[in-house]
Image: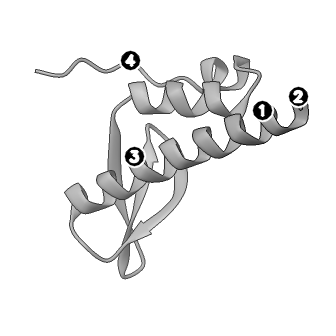
Amino acid sequence: MTTYQAFSRETLSSFKTLAEQCRYLLSCKISATASGKALQARVGDFLLPVFCNGDEYQTIQKAVLWLKTQAVNYLNAAKQQEI
């Protein structure tokens, strides 16, 4: 059984970088809610900009991929600035 952190907007905003925020969101339960004809991923009451025409599982998979991609892109950009 997977244990998730309870989502808090205060905790989310306490992180300084996008990578830290993504890591925190990935540690919370991601779900999907109806948004028009598609499903939209969310963490608690925080809506993610991830939409899917599939089922809830596919929407969650897409959200996880999006969050991981955002974190990696941020870290790569930060690394480039150091050079």
Q: Disc 4 on helix, strand or loop?
A: loop
Q: Would residue 11 appear left or right of 29 to someone viewing this image? A: right
> Which quarter of the figure is the N terminus placed in?
top left
Mark pair 3, 1: CA separation: 23 Å
Other-residue count near label 4 (Cα within 10 Å), few / some / many at <14 / 14–19 / ≥20: few
Q: Would residue 65 appear left or right of 53 to someone viewing this image? A: right
Q: Name the N-terminal-most of marks 3 and 1.
A: 3
The disc at residue 82 is 2
Label 1 sits on what residue type? Answer: Lys
For disc 4, the marked residue is 5
| Camera-side residue of 44 and 15 | 15
Other-residue count near label 2 (Cα within 10 Å), few / some / many at <14 / 14–19 / ≥20: few
Q: Name the N-terminal-most of marks 2 and 4.
A: 4
CB under 8 Å between discs 1 and 4:
no
The disc at residue 79 is 1
Label 4 sits on what residue type? Answer: Gln
Label 2 sits on what residue type? Answer: Glu
Residue visible at 31% across and 52% down in the picture: 60
